[in-house]
Amino acid sequence: MNIIGRVTKDATVRTLSDSRQVVNFSVAINDSYKDRQSERVEQTTFFECAYWISPRVADWLTKGTVVELTGRVSARAWKGTDGEPRAGLNFNTSNIKLHGGGKKSDMVESAQESQTAEPAPKAENKKLTVKEPEDDIPF
């Protein structure tokens, strides 16, 4: 399943007891439609997301960033501290595509860092040797 929404707060990285790391963040999806009385209804759906592949992505998942996520949805239910039943949606993310947004200060700092960073050293011209296969038939 794919969803597109905005990150609602900066992502956090949690380390589990078995040393695995997970990136946790939440995403809001806004939707609007007209009801039977032709009145516009705004609806927001929140997903609690988990990303297990690399904790480095947490630096990019800041509040306001528009993301496209691929993964699996699951529902959860629990009783709140007040005893009332609650429900929510989880999204186990397997792929993240950033579409921009985020904190303005982060983008300004990132732009300043890229302007002041030293250029990468040029690679030397090295000749690449490729060994030809002995047979004409590759299988």
Image: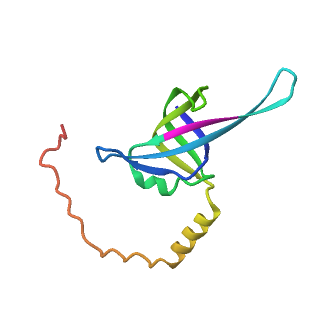
Q: Is residue 57 left or right of residue 28?
A: left
Q: Is residue 114 left or right of residue 43?
A: left
Determine the image quadrant of residue 56: bottom left
Vertical arrangement, residue 55 with respect to residue 30, above or below: below
x, y (%) of residue 2?
54, 35
x, y (%) of residue 46?
61, 37
Q: Is residue 13 magenta?
A: no
Quarter of the figure that contains the C terminus: top left
Task: Decide which of 18, 78 is in the foreground and name it.
Answer: 78
Q: How is the image coloured?
A: rainbow
Which residues lie in the magenta part? Answer: 44-49
Q: Is residue 52 left or right of residue 125?
A: right
Determine the image quadrant of residue 27: top right
What residue is shown at x 43% (from left), y 51% (from top)? 13
What residue is shown at x 36% (from left), y 76% (from top)? 122
Q: Is residue 39 left or right of residue 121?
A: right
